[in-house]
Image (spheres, rainbow, N blue to C red):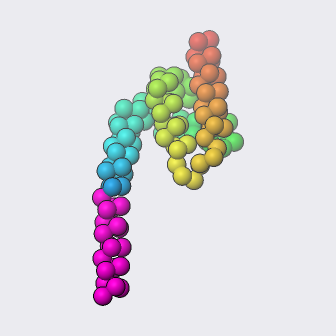
Amino acid sequence: MAKLSSHVTALFIVVALVCAFVPVFSVEEAEAKTLWDTCLVKITPKCALNIIAVVFGNGTLIESCCQDLVQEGKVCHDNLIKYIADRPSLIGRETQYLKKRDDVWSHCVSISKTA
């Protein structure tokens, strides 16, 4: 009888945890859809990948992508990079990525002003 009681308790805990976290995942999916609908459509896929490679890797910024980035806007740029930087696999390096994000933005704005 004690085993049955412990199994029922464990099942209850699992169900409670699932119910608690399902809305969190839904919010994250809604946030991703909003970012996609409002921000990613403003920049070409080639430039989006280039900027991600620069911020999260050792990519070289294609200067023609700066125009797309500035047109996309700082809020979109900041939110998209932060969204990617918040992935569990990147935890602990967010500050590094956010600095690179800001450096890319500043560089692109300065190029766009002179063009």
In this rendering, is residue 31 above or below 106?
below
| Residue shown at the point (60%, 41%) measured from the top left | 94
Q: Is 6 covered by the magenta stretch? A: yes
Please say whether residue 113 is visible from this viewpoint: yes
The residue furthest front is: 2
| Residue shown at the point (30%, 76%) measured from the top left | 8
Rendered image quadrant of residue 103 = top right
Number of on-image labels? 0
The residue furthest bottom is: 1
Q: Where's residue 23, x and y in %?
A: 31, 50
The residue furthest top is: 114
Q: Where's residue 26, x and y in %?
A: 32, 49
Q: Is 42 covered by the magenta stretch? A: no
Q: Is residue 42 left or right of residue 15?
A: right
Q: Is residue 5 left or right of residue 110?
A: left
What secondary structure do most residues of the magenta stretch adopt?
Answer: helix
The quadrant of the image that shows the N terminus is: bottom left
Q: Nearer the viewer, residue 70 or 77?
A: 77
| Residue shown at the point (57%, 53%) measured from the top left | 89
Please say whether residue 61 is visible from this viewpoint: no
Rendered image quadrant of residue 7 = bottom left
In this rendering, is residue 92 above or below 81?
below
Q: Nearer the viewer, residue 6 or 62?
A: 6
Q: Nearer the viewer, residue 19 or 76?
A: 19
Give the magenta range.
1-19
Q: Where's residue 63, x and y in %?
A: 62, 27
The quadrant of the image that shows the C terminus is: top right
Q: Where's residue 18, x and y in %?
A: 33, 61
In this rendering, is residue 105 above or below 84?
above
| Residue shown at the point (35%, 85%) measured from the top left | 3
